[in-house]
Image (cartoon, rainbow, N blue to C red):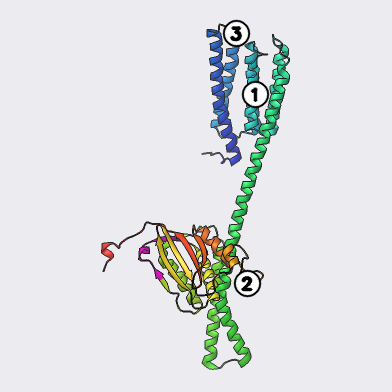
Amino acid sequence: MFRPAPLDSETRALRETGRLLVQIRWLAIAGQIAATVFAARVLGLDLPLDRMALVIAGLVGFNLIVALALRRDARLPDAVLALQLGIDTLTLAALIALAGAAASPFAMLLLVPLLLALSLCSARAALPIHLLANLCVAALVGFGPVPGTALVPAFGLSSTLMAWFVLRLRLTVAARDRAIEDLRRAKAEADQLAGLGLLASGMAHELGTPLTTLAVTLDDWAEVGLPEGAARQKDLETMVAQTRRCRAIVTRTLQAAGRERLETAAAVPAEAEIRRILALWSGARGRARVPVRADPGLRGAQMLSASILEAALINLLDNAESAAPGTVTATLSRQGNRLILRLSDRGPGFPDRVLAQPGTPFASGTGAPGRGLGLFLARNAIDRLGGRMALRNTATGAEVEIAFPLLDRPQTEEPADARP
């Protein structure tokens, strides 16, 4: 069975505009019939009802054809919309002429199809409707029974001013929409770049330990010479293991780089995920586990996690360790439907410049070139997961507070079957 090709967004928009015109035309036809009947029956005007009925019937038939065409999958160019509005203009002009109201204010009704053309069609398609409406008014006045020469310049001025205003308004709206789209695209690109930068920063931190091990071993070999027997075999096994670890880190980072739009984000147990990342950081650097104090109310709570969260927390932990080695602690608590993670150290605290501009790129207390991206990348990753990061200095050092949204309600007590 033949199926028409799917329509693009522009073609669908034009077809929706065509349907709107059909609905407006039905309303206009109903208004024309009501006005004609009122003028003939109530006001007692002598009107050529047969010819007026013929014009209205022609418009009804034309609208039926357009409505049936729109039910099919045929394309609807912008010029077709202008053609429809041109026919509406000619039909309305014919009814005004037959009613003998050529030089009356009713001629100003010809502004209606012009306004629709200016609103729904492109400027190139609306210009012929503008010229046609003015020609119709000139013809009505020139061939009408009642002179009304002042109507022609009045209509021309009104239609021109309206065309200029509507087209300028459309250009302004289009420029605003383009600016919004550019900002949206720039933000998406900046988010993706920040995510990639965070992955690169995390990879650099993770590669530090295995590369240092390799460098120390090779330096020892260069200074002391190659070891013999079991000692050399042990060093070789260590170097092979560290090289494999470097390859695994690079492979994992490259895989994560292709998923920076969080397609792989998943719900995980909140406390277990934070403890896993803390243990990963401690184990990778050969240090004791980070002390963790956890609120019992977190039992069963879940949060959204992705690869960028791991890289962000490792970045923050590295910063704290470099400022105050061996003093990093973590606290987990629950406030309503949010997980609060506090990472504290006993170092000198954050510099005033960093606290004044938290998470700003290159805002570093050291002032060294290229430094200060860690907090920016970490904050960006946390924001993308729906969290918030705050920096503060305490009486004992620095503290980073991170609030993550939880995905379930608080669990006040364990189920009966889970109790010992």
Q: What is the x, y in percent for residue 28?
A: 56, 21
Quick one: label 1, few (<14), some, or many (20+) residues within 10 Å?
many
Q: In the figure, 115 relative to 249: above or below?
A: above
> CA separation, marks 2 and 3?
91 Å
Label 2: state its secondary structure: loop
Residue at horizontal 58%, vertical 34%?
A: 15
Task: Give the spatial CA distance, label 2 vs label 1.
Answer: 69 Å
Query: Residue 294's spot in the image, x, y percent?
Result: 39, 68
Q: Which residue is mark 2?
A: 366
Give the extent of the magenta segment. Answer: 293-304
Q: Is residue 297 magenta?
A: yes
User: Which amino acid type is marked by label 1?
Assistant: Leu
Percent coordinates x, y for residue 184 in the rendering: 60, 50
In the picture provided, is 135 more to the left or to the right than 1?
right
Residue at image x 68%, y 35%? 168
Q: Nearer the viewer, mark 1 or mark 3?
A: 1
Q: Position of residue 11 (x, y in %)?
A: 60, 38
Query: Helix, strand or loop at disc 3?
Result: loop
Residue bearing mark 1: 111
Q: Which quadrant would residue 207 be assigned to in this image?
A: bottom right
